[in-house]
Amino acid sequence: MIGGTRSEVMAEINFWTDDPPHPAKFCVEGNSTIVWDNWLGSCTSGGSAPVKIGGEGSETMSLVGDSLLNRTLAMRGVRNYAAALAIYTDLLAGQPHAPEAEIALLELRNAYHDYADFSGNENLRQVMRTFLRTQMNDHPNAAVKLLAKLLTASELMRQEDFASAQSEYLQLLATASTSEQRRACVSELFNISAMGLHNRAAAAGYLARLQREWPNHDATKIAALRFASFPERTGSNKPLGGSAPLGKDGAVNSALPTAYRLEQNDPNPFNPSTTIRYALTTPARVHLAIYNVLGQRVAELVNDVQAAGVHSLVWDGRNSAGVSVASGVYFYRIEAQPMNANAPFTAIKKMMLLK
């Protein structure tokens, strides 16, 4: 990398590729530029070792990072979907174990939908769905494979092919290796039965399993509330709305916590709603909000003084205007200012909405 107004090398890196390096793979700020020559398809004798990118047991170095993912969002903002898709595809193939691989797969799926909507070419959606199936079968990263399976099932629900979606989740349930994976599958099967197939008897069966195996889980409580809201004859596909807390005044545990904390939302990934828990050791003014990957505030869930205790609330995937937000990565941030004038507590976590 060459400085914009200075004749000096700012950074050097070995980059093995059969083609010229794609400039979009590098983040360049200000007037700096990238200069390359004599790119190599493989390491030649006498050359220094290439930078290790991905791979189990290797020292992982990502050339992409959140800044490039934000850059692909900018590309999509000016309708340059092909360039963004090329970067996502290159990342998944060339850096399968990079931290951004899962986000790249999710955003690839979203970009294909945006591209299809913009161009009117519905075949793009089928190309994307074929790609997802390839990833779920062949990708070397187990986390990416699992996400591809979830996205594939989600696509079937988007197509309102609820029977096929049910089949996919039943297969995922049969191969689930952890209790949490099994619970997530049973929760989705409940949603499909109740809101997609309108099969009240099947929904009741999945709810009974949730109550038997995960009786104290918030997902079980939410499913029970949804089931109670469905008409007896036809059911309803209307999701729970709002972000009302569970339990009296939002507190779900009478024992006072010993430390402030913000927990990971559950389920995650989620559709259409997820539960966020946090703990306050003393009464505090709490501000909790949702942000997108560009740092824009999407929704404000809490802005009030709350008592000490463990609190829980549900975000239904809607913004401040009550409109359902798109699939993607979101962040939730809490700031709690204790009423005793102690230092404030702040924390932020990432979550993923899949539709």
Image (tube, rainbow, N blue to C red):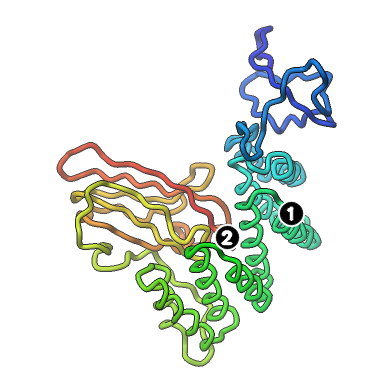
Relative to 82, residue 129 above or below = below
Q: Residue at x 80, y 30 (%)?
A: 17
Q: Gap between marks 2 and 1, in whole Å? A: 21 Å
Q: Residue at x 56, y 84 (%)?
A: 198
Residue 78 can be seen in this image: no
Say which amino acid is labelled 2: Leu
- CA neighbours of label 1 inside 10 A, class few (<14), some (14 to 19), many (20+): few
x%, y% of residue 178? 51, 62
Q: Which residue is mark 2?
A: 354
Residue furthest to the bottom: 233
Q: Which residue is mark 1?
A: 138
Q: Residue at x 42, y 74 (%)?
A: 213
Residue 346 can be seen in this image: yes
Say which amino acid is labelled 1: Asp
Q: Earlier in the sequence, mark 2 or mark 1?
A: 1
Badge 1 element: helix
